[in-house]
Amino acid sequence: MSPGPQGFVLAAPTGGEPVQDLLSDALAALSQAFTVTPEAGAPSARRRTWLDTFDWRLYRAGLTLELERVTRGGRLLLSNVDGTPQAEQPVTGWPPRRPALDVPPGPVRDRIMALISPRALLPIVRAISTVSVARLLNADGKTVARLVADHITATTVAAGTATADTASAGTTAELPLRLAIAEVRGYPGQARRAAALLTGVPGVSRAGQSVFTAALSALGRHPADYTSGVDAEITASMPASVAVARLLLRLLDTLEQNVDGVLRDIDTEFLHDLRVAVRRTRSAIKLLGGVLPADLAEHYKTEFKWLGDLTTPTRDLDVHLLGFGPMTAQLVAASPADLEPLRAFLVRRRVREFRRLAAALRGPRFRAITEDWRKALLQIRDAGVSGKRRRPPTAAELALSTTGRTFRRIVAHGAAITPDSPPESLHDLRKRAKELRYLLEFFAPLHDPVAYRKVVGDLKALQDCLGAFQDSQVQREEIHALADAMLAERAAPAATLLAMGEIAAKLTLSQAEAREDFALRFARFAGSAGQEHIRVLLEGRR
Amino acid sequence: MKIFATYNIKGGVGKTTAAVNLAHLSAADGDRTLLWDLDPQGAASFLFRIKPRVKGGGKALIRGTRTLDDAIKGTDFDHLDLIPADFTYRNMDLLLGAADKTGKPTRKLAQLLRPLAAEYDHVFLDCPPSISLVSENVMHAADVLLVPLIPTTLSVRTLDQLTEFVAGFNGHRPEVRPFFSMVDRRKKLHQEITKDLMAERPGVAATPIPSLSLTERMAVERAPVTAFAPRSQAARAYRALWSEFSA
């Protein structure tokens, strides 16, 4: 790869010189040291699209992915956010019409697949530019650098193709003219000299942003503007009802941002994020709903349970299908091919379940939930309605009481679990642990970050163990249920059932291992160190 | 990476002109191409307007204190780079002999070029006229020896000597591809020798390069004729010749 160009932006201050005059000034400056001659031929057109996952996995890893349309196909270029090239590969017939879940083999794929999988790559911004090139010649008439002028028009992707942010979908913006000094190999000093001459021209400044970032900001978007995390704007002193309304509104935003991706079945993680938002909402209503009007909390408790249950069958099938590869890799006696009828069965089922899910998400009950819920929450947020209390509790007081209470419940519940306790006791503990995790996340802005990380670290270790225990059991039960269903549909060859039996046996072993781990993990969480961590968190609240 | 070398023991037979035009055509086809001007006279460097100077001179390159990569200059043409000549190349025989510690002084250039294999599709070596350790190195490094021949009886004799010399190599032997250069159609002798040799030797290129004043203008234009007069007879001849060699 040739050395990256040194970029500049021509931006006239308001009421200043027109860009054309600035360009003339830039050319005049370069003429002090070089003969500037236009490259033969007409200016070329450049069509570029930047891609990322819906949750910006590439950008968050410090990368950008650009697809440039060239004759006979395209070129994928992976760069650091600052524009330094990392890898590139040619592609033909890619991306397909649907957002791509995979990339053709090549160095770019090698770098990104582990990062993005199982998410699809979506177009984020498109840029069409007209590129004119001038050669900078030395006294021998040799080209020692090139001046590349790039007139860029950026467009957000069409409504609904990548983002629920329909307000800015399809928006177009013209970027300030960008100039770049492209180095000719073996002449780095001349490129530096040309760049230094440009730096001295009033109105010309070093490009502080990559084209991608500049295009996003011109279009009113910000990189990484979606996160599935809870980052509601709450403060310790605001009324608890307002803080809870803000939290719930933030969760509703996340839920709604994922609906389009779910309906278009772009990738499995839209539904996953939607479900997490629903679960968090249900926990928030359960644990914090006391500060909301009672009838409101009661009504939406039912509605969000309906929504959660609605999404479960499709998600369960997604989990099975996503884990199919690793699952078949564990087989010792059976062969992966034996499980193919199971995969086909799961795919057929998913088609059916997804159809049901999509119909419900397009239906009146779902619309009513989101619209009316938002209205009610906005009213509480803006009016500070707090039920019948005379002095409403603050967000900090609510955080303190609920977090402390939930922690104590987990300690009591866990301490009562013995090696002879039934699996249900561990399942219940898992639910409580998840509630504590959500509470911590809801009130994260009120906590000291160091104390917060310690408590979450302790809790996560316990949750992983409880998760492994319950997931193994649920999956084993599902394998049995699937075997029954396949038999009923006469879709279960004997080899497949035997292979499924082997998988079920492995799950039993994993569950037993998790069960053995439990005592140690719980002791770490609920022991003196864990107690001290939660005490510091709650008492050292900001 | 395929290495072509334009070589003839005689000077003034069109080696540099061929190397410059064929390298330009290779790059114009989209192949990543490198031309190494090994002739201390630096004619190829001059034609691409590149100063015939390498930091540290030939010594640094041969000894490996500087890599070839450091010496590469981009030309004015896409996909075409050049390693310039340096006046110190006149002592390259001595340098090659002195730098070698393996007992294989004839393999040094091949060894220096090896790291560039991933970066270039085609390399052209423009050799100085002589028979020396440098030319022997070139023959060992090259996959194809492009031998320009002025159609005279003596040239034919020289070709025979070269073919015999290469046949004596152990291991890697470059393919010898002679072609007629500076052919003057008005001269009966040129016509006869061209015709006879093409009939006798199957490896001789079918395309002769005519002697044309436009080719001499390269020194004035300081560019390949295939670039400044792409539709000329000279450019057409080089394009046909490159089609034969790149097939």
Image (cartoon, coloured by chain):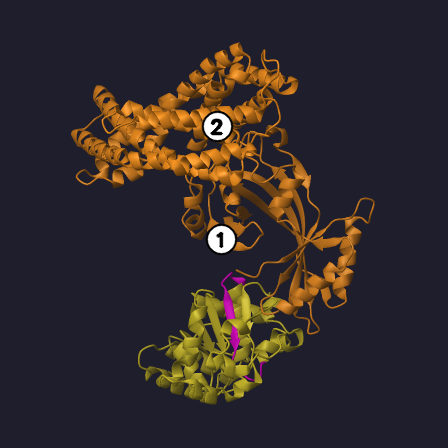
Chain colours: A orange, B yellow
Label 2 SS = helix
Is residue A315 in sight in this rendering?
no
Image-based side of A277 in relation to A389, left or right: left
Is residue A398 in sight in this rendering?
yes
**For mark 2, what is the residue?**
A439
Residue drawn at 78 percent across, 61 percent down:
A28
Mark 2 or mark 1, earlier in chain: 1
Q: Which image quarter: residue B133? A: bottom left
Say which quadrant the C terminus of chain B sits in: bottom left
Residue drawn at 65 percent across, 67 percent down:
A144
Q: Is residue A309 above or below residue A166?
A: above
**For mark 1, what is the residue?**
A88
Disc tally is: 2
Q: Is residue B39 magenta?
A: yes
Q: For the magenta stretch, what is the residue range?
A: B28-42
Provide the chain ID for the residue under circle 1.
A
Q: Main secondary structure of the magenta part?
A: loop
Within 10 Å of the Cα at label 2, are there few (<14), some (14-19), or many (20+) other Cα atoms?
A: many
Amino acid at pointer 2? Leu
Provide the chain ID for the residue under circle 2.
A
Image-based side of B235 in relation to A508, left or right: right
Residue B125 in percent (x, y) is at: 48, 76
Q: Which image quarter: residue B21? A: bottom right
Amino acid at pointer 1? Glu
Q: Is residue A229 above or below residue B44?
A: above
Image-based side of A93 in relation to A222, left or right: left
